[in-house]
Image: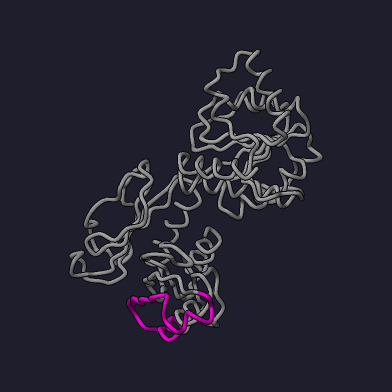
Amino acid sequence: MRDVVRVLANDLANGKPVLLCQVVETRGSTPQKAGALMIVRPDGSQVGTLGGGCVEAEVKQKAIRRLDQPGAELHSYVLDHDYAWADGLICGGKMVILTEMLRGPAAAAYFDAWKLQHERGQGFSEAIVLDPERAGVEVLGSRWLFDADGRCVADWNGRGEPPSTPEPLEGRPRPAVRDGLAWLPSLPRIRLVIVGAGHVGQAVASLAARADFDVWVVDDRAQYANPERFPDAQRLLVGPIDRILSELDMDRPTYALVVTRGHGHDQEALYHLAPTTAEYVGLIGSRRKIRMIFENLRDQGIPEEALARVCAPVGLEIGSESVIEIAISIVAELIAWRNLGPRAARSVRLGAETTR
């Protein structure tokens, strides 16, 4: 998503026209959910996806036909049509997609503000007019952008105050359509602190960055924790693990993953992380190793409730054997935790436990 947003904002800032195609409403099972983006350039190239297949191809063709035409257009697709059969999109769901050609300084200013909100990672919301009459707004596709505190920071064709305000992000709101407006919340981006820059940490970092986590890597070895091995990491923290973790600021949503090179370093890291306010703490290793570490930490005074919330062994059970399979199982668990919430994610873990 961030890559698509950057391309969109940069093309507009450079005076290039862009065809924006965005999923603004879904019902039932669909290949992409509300908020998904695809931009189409006048030469026919695209960035982003709406789920692939015939739906995406048809949206792209309709978008290209709108070159140099002002205004936005809505398209609805029910995924049980004949055109969906060939692509396996018989999901039974419905997708509503807004397309609009954007150009000029006003569009550039709005989507530059949009890019800034994405980059900050603190969360934001967007309201898009789908039904001008119900929304009391003249222009289909008008947009308002709200920051993490619910303040309106930009508008596109809004021409005044927004019709209403977004739900607080703390309540983990989902995309919804109300009173002619599509509300598209973007929750605060999760910072993933990976303690250990070995092979598993490296593979997890690569996958997690692609899944839109902000990746921080902690290790005491500069030859491992470096930009060449972690090109997608937001920060590399090199030094004594106990010092770095004891000073770690937990002022934003944070997940912590312990995948160091040995039991002693794992225990050291968990000593600092288990009692923190990190929303997720995971530890890799065998059950025997985990029992030993937990026993030692109890002896060191770590409360039982702090240890009880540690996910160990980390990762969903998929029969992992290779490094990349282990990384996939870990990142799948992180995504479940982020997208479903801790309670639902724990139920997924419990389901996986029964198969071990």
Asked if residue 146 lies left or right of residue 306, the reply is: left
Q: Quadrant of the C terminus?
A: top right
Span colored in magenta: 62-88
Coloration of the structure image: one colour
Name, please, the residue furthest toward the bottom. 65
Residue 141 picture location, percent across and down? 31, 69
Query: Which residue is painted at 37% across and 48% down in the image?
Result: 147
Residue 236 picture location, percent across and down? 68, 39
Q: Nearer the viewer, residue 239 or 29?
A: 29
Residue 165 picture location, percent across and down? 26, 51
**Is 202 located above or below residue 21 in the figure?**
above
Q: Does the image show residue 239?
A: yes
**Is 350 located above or below residue 50 in the figure?**
above
Query: Which residue is painted at 48% across and 64% down in the image?
Result: 9
Q: Is residue 71 magenta?
A: yes
Residue 122 picture location, percent across and down? 45, 44
Q: Is residue 255 magenta?
A: no
Asked if residue 152 lies left or right of residue 313, the reply is: left
Total count of labels: 0
Q: Nearer the viewer, residue 192 or 127?
A: 192
**Is 261 located above or below residue 300 in the figure?**
below
Residue 244 falls in image quadrant:
top right
Query: Which residue is painted at 74% across and 34% down in the image?
Result: 260
Q: Nearer the viewer, residue 164 or 338?
A: 338
